[in-house]
Image: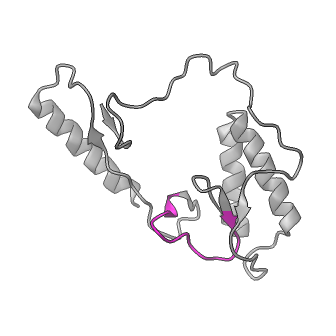
Amino acid sequence: IWTTNPNSRMGGSRTTVGRDNAKPKHKFKRGEHDYTQEGDIDPKICTLSLGQINVQLSKRLQHRLNREYTEADAIQEELSNTHSVTIHDGRKIWRADGEGWGNGHAAYDIGGKEQRLVRPYNLSGELNGLSPSDVELVQTKISVRSEAKRC
């Protein structure tokens, strides 16, 4: 198994059992979310007010909690491409000042203003009958995919 989790011994820990009927753990009211603003809103590049951004972030979060990823992604793309609001889900922050994230966290910048961070994949667990040439082929394909993700 190839994984980006350096602590993994048997591959990913994700499971899909019972997800179809899962209910969101959190219910946020309109305009509420758990993201923190970083930097000031630059009115020269962002036409939305703080309240409007909060409403959009709240809608996006509800879609994510409901596993409605297409709708959540559409809101994120609109915020980024139309209003220059970038969201960093891993750190639960957002900004509308035209600045990047720095420290290699640009993978969350849908606007494509910075190069994407690509985590390395490592072999973990059993080979499950794969020959050394099969392992080399998989590693080559992962390398090609990782390079393509940088664009």
Q: Quadrant of the N terminus?
A: top left
Q: Position of residue 50 (x, y in %)?
A: 84, 67
Identify the residue at image location x=32%, y=31%.
9
Residue ID at (69%, 40%): 64
- Dividing the picture into quarters, in which one does residue 121 lie? top left
Q: Is residue 34 left or right of residue 116?
A: right
In the rendered image, the quadrant that contains the C terminus is bottom left
- Secondary structure of the magenta portion, mostly? loop
Q: Residue 96: within the magenta?
A: yes
Q: Position of residue 13 (x, y in %)?
A: 45, 29
The colour scheme used here is one colour
* Residue 15 belongs to the span the image colors magenta: no
* Magenta stretch bounds: 94-107
Q: Residue at horizontal 71%, vertical 37%?
A: 65
User: Image check: 137 left or right of 79?
Assistant: left
Q: Quadrant of residue 25?
A: top right
